[in-house]
Image (cartoon, helix red, strand yellow):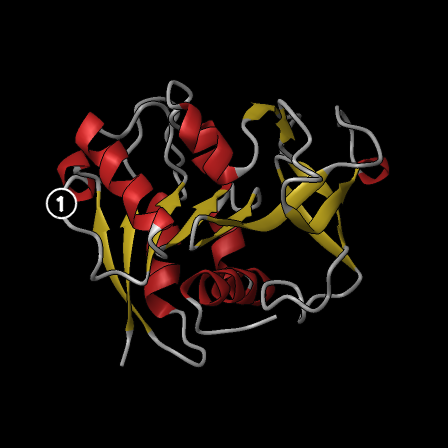
Amino acid sequence: MACRLLVHTRTADYRHDSIPDAVAALRALGGPEAFEVEHTEDPEALARPLDGYAAVVFLSTSGEVLTSAGRERLAAYVERGGGFVGVHAAACTEYDWPYYGELLGARFARHPEYQPGRVLVEDPDHPATRHLPAEWAFTDEWYDFRTNPRGSVRVLARADESSYRGGGMGPDHPLVWCREQGRGRVFYTALGHASEAYADPDFRAHLRGGIEWATGTATG
């Protein structure tokens, strides 16, 4: 039976041109469990019961995208055991809601120009990273965060700031992580700025593994 995902892409600030390609990539993902994707930009969709979904995915959302009822519903869903996945600009979302910052693990601060660099895999046992090389060449915006989430999250991969220009966090620069919130599982990847990422087989497998972990269909 397919895992149902609610994929939310509402933007109240910067909007990524890659969103249509990102949604299409999620629809195409396979793996141990296929995903049944329900895509929405309606904030009321988050204010309705969420228990029928294996995970809620915030895919390059930005700004304040939830109603008060949606905030309450999402928090209750995760605390009771629902999965939550944040991709790229999900870290630029709901700055006015303190719980969301705790849920995700860190908030976006800035990024240098879009450019090639290296991702250093710290945890090769996780479904999101076990297929990747120890040093993964990738092109992205290399997000800096307001705080370093290490200590409150399980860091899966970090940015190698020596491989690109303009990094602002130093040698300890988490980029991909997961954590537990209540009885729920949370996965976040800062990667995924451009449409090209969603055509990359390694990045697709990265997303699939993160989603499978958040939904509980994969362990590691």
Can residue 88 be spotted in the picture? yes
Q: Nearer the viewer, residue 155 or 182?
A: 182
Please tell me which residue is depicted at 71% across the width and 51% down the height of the picture. 157
The crowd level at tag 1 (other Cα within 10 Å; few <14, some 14-19, many 20+) is few
**Dot 1 lies on which element?**
loop
Q: Position of residue 34 (x, y in %)?
A: 35, 76
Q: Position of residue 217 (x, y in %)?
A: 44, 73
Q: Is residue 159 above or below residue 106?
A: below
Quadrant where the C terminus sits is: bottom right
Residue 154: x, y in percent? 66, 50
Toward the top, the furthest residue is 96
The residue closer to the viewer here, 9 or 116, is 9
Quarter holding the N terminus is bottom left
- Residue plotted at (37% across, 44% down): 58
Q: Amino acid at mark 1?
A: Arg
Q: Which residue was labeled with disc 1?
A: 48
147 on left or right of 27? right
Q: Is residue 165 left or right of residue 96?
A: right
Name which quarter of the figure residue 52 lies in: bottom left
Residue 156 vs residue 16, the one in the foreground? 156
Q: Residue at x 42, y 32 (%)?
A: 100
